[in-house]
Image (cartoon, rainbow, N blue to C red):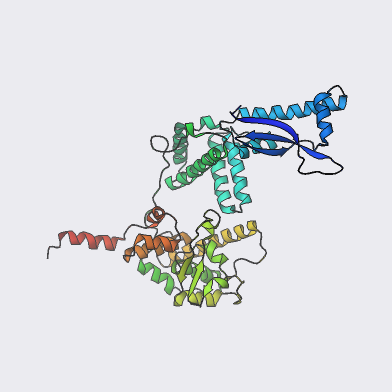
Amino acid sequence: MAVGVSTKIILDTWRPVKDGLFPVKLRVFYKRSHRDYSLPEKKYLGSKEDIEEIKHNDKKKDLKKLLLYFNEIETRANDIIKGMPSFNFPSFERKFKDPTFDNTSFYSVFKEYIETLKKQKRIGTAESYSSSYEILKKYKKSLQFYELTPELLQSFENWMVKKEKSLTTVGIYTRNIRAVYNYSISKGYINRDSYPFGRGKYEIPAGRNIKKALSKSEIKKIIDYSPAPGSLEEFSRDMWLFSYLCNGMNINDIARLKYSNLVDNKSIVFHRQKTRLTKKQNQRPIKAFLGEIALKIIEIHGNDRLPENYIFEILKPGMTDEKIFTTIRQTVKNINNYIRKIAGKLEITKDVTTYTARHTFATMLKHSGVPTDFISEQLGHYDIKTTENYLDSFDDETLIKYTENLTKFE
């Protein structure tokens, strides 16, 4: 058993139930503090006299059964404590309440983490982790923590590459695996002694996508394109342009915009949905200036101008979190479908998606000489390295211009 941990069956005398009876609970002591836990299987109520009689008179059949039950509870609790690399109350509680939970199984903890994300209403993130969970299980059906070594992770990466997964995709899956491992450490399920990630161990690949951004001439083609008024093609083109013109705002945030976010019909102030739950402290509001085209898009596709109305009729009041998630995902799918077709008609050879609009916004600012820290703020990034990864390489025209300067001596 971990040093300084002890257990005891007690009466919770702070919470009388009725007629001088109190709930019987397990008390766990650790480092001058303690916590009480309700007994599983049964809810036993007793008086102070009952507990004393149970302890000193185990000959009565009924009392003997209760004493055996209490001893069984303490034995189970002590077995859990013995199996913990380091004691903490939250991880003990998790195992005590659900004896079937196996904190030595990476997959058991993985599933718990996914359920935690769902409870936090991070539906999209939970789906991403579910995908990582499923592909890892295809590679290895069962997985204990001690098996999760740098060698296994590298083998898993090689296996995915053979299945034609890009390094970017591999990076997403393995970062999710690392996050679950870190979660396990924070819960006390394992310690850091065998941590498989980092320099000299397994290093997560950083895929780099080249030329996501469009050129100015390609953007102008999309602006000048004339879809049929009121069509899904028009809506998709306009949502793509709105994203590009408003700080590369993603569709998740565009769908949630309300007229209360509109300031003097000149700008929009909002918080990124992506960081709303993960960055609860010091969230920075993002301000996007509304130019002529963006204002026209609101005029064409906007809802009734009431403060609590969504600007665009993508979401409806009263939707569940799951319905919001599936609606936004389908909206993104539709926009990508139509904007790709528009790009094909305009002979734009790049793969144009909603993601491209965000990259193009950032890259255009970069080519205009705007400092990276300003671009980072406009994108709503908390780490400037994230912004640096977003920024596209310079276009061929700019590279040619800079290269020619190498031999211009006059």
How many discs mark residues in the rendered view? 0
Q: Is residue 159 placed above or below 406 in the rendered structure? A: above
Question: With 54 as the anchor, is 355 left or right in this view?
Answer: left
The quarter of the displayed image where residue 2 is located: top right
Residue 202: image location, x then y, percent: 42, 36
Residue at 60% across, 61% down? 327
Q: State the residue in front, 136 or 68.
A: 68
Residue 98 seen by the camera: no
Which quadrant, please, contains the N terminus? Answer: top right
Question: With 150 as the anchor, is 32 left or right in this view?
Answer: right
Residue at 77% across, 40% down? 13
Q: Is residue 39 placed above or below 338 in the rendered structure? A: above
Q: State the residue in front, 118 or 90.
A: 90
Residue at 62% across, 46% down? 115
Residue 19: image location, x then y, percent: 87, 42
Residue 315: image location, x then y, percent: 61, 66
Residue 84 seen by the camera: yes
Q: Is residue 286 placed above or below 36 in the rendered structure? A: below
Q: Residue extending furthest top?
A: 59
The quarter of the displayed image where residue 231 is located: bottom right
Q: State the residue in front, 338 or 89.
A: 89
Which quadrant, please, contains the C terminus? Answer: bottom left
Q: State the residue in front, 345 or 62.
A: 62
Residue 401: image location, x then y, percent: 23, 63
